[in-house]
Image (cartoon, helix red, strand yellow):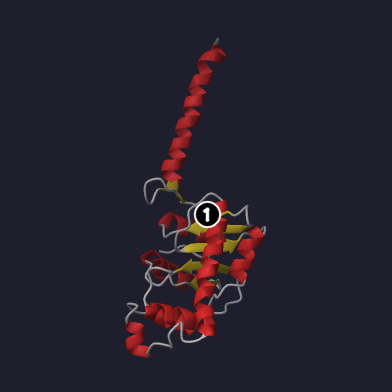
Amino acid sequence: MRLAIIAPIIVSVLILAGLAYVAIYEKPPVPGRLLPKTPKTITVGVAELTDALTNGPWVSPGLSGKAIYSIGFRTCPDCVNFKRTEFADYHKANIDTRVIIYARRDNSSAAEQAIVADLACTRNWSIFERWMEDVPEAYGEIYGLPPAANSDKRRAACLEWGRVVRERVAHVVKQNGWPMETPAMFWRAKNGDWRMFLGDDKRGKRLIRKELGVPQAR
């Protein structure tokens, strides 16, 4: 009799706890979609993710510590904010920020495509730093635009390189139950597992810092 009374109470408590977890730890950016609000472990498509990231057109300051990969596009506000708030402290902690910038297929200008192709072809961190210093349009005014992305086969291939990597990574993210979002951050845990965080969220950024051993922002 006592068990019959207690059991429904336990079930109700578990249900409420589950709803509370979703409300606190998962962020719905748009109706019907959930993004993780805490870092997640990649369990499906590990080999594909490893190949896509390590062989992608990433640029970095070349630091010798742990690596964190960031995937995004230049006009993504969250990508810009993540770089602005996190990268300086990552670098002080010797974390190598490996950035993969792609130009969206249906929503990117010729100038953006040209700079993305140049970035991928040269793997030059200073191009990325200069491009991020001001509004995107300022780069061409200050430094001049590189040749168009479709000016030769090599540059066209460099432009496509980032897009293909983004699509491969999005496929892995989907296999693990999440929609792709930018910035998409990936790093290795101490046991070698790939860890992932999507978007720009204050709590998520604190947790990434904790995992990478980066002092918390003041």
Residue 182, image x and y in percent? 44, 62
Judged left or right of residue 106, residue 180 is right
Q: Residue at x 38, y 81 (%)?
A: 111
Q: Is residue 30 left or right of residue 101?
A: left
Q: Nearer the viewer, residue 87 or 117?
A: 117
Residue drawn at (48%, 22%), measured in percent from left and top?
9
Q: Relative to residue 154, is residue 8 depicted above or below?
A: above
Q: Is residue 102 visible?
A: yes
Q: Tally the numbered discs.
A: 1
Q: Quadrant of the N terminus?
A: top right
Q: Residue at x 50, y 57 (%)?
A: 197
The vertical placement of 62 against 34, above or below, is below
| Residue at 54% across, 56% down | 173
Q: Residue 193: tell me if it is visible.
A: no
Q: How far across and down, in percent of the image, does residue 121 sit?
A: 53, 83
Q: Is residue 42 above or below residue 99?
A: above
Residue 54: x, y in percent? 62, 70
| Image: 108 above or below 176 | below
Question: What amino acid is labelled 1 in the image?
Answer: Pro
Crowd around label 1: few <14 · some 14–19 · many ≥20 (10 Å): some
Q: Nearer the viewer, residue 76 or 103?
A: 103
> Circle 1 sits in a helix, a strand or a loop, which is it?
loop
Residue 171 at what x, y percent from top left?
Answer: 55, 58
Quarter that holds the C terminus: bottom left
Q: Is residue 56 or residue 6 the one in the foreground?
A: 56
Q: Is residue 215 left or right of residue 131?
A: right
Quarter of the figure with residue 56: bottom right
- The residue labelled by disc 1 is 39
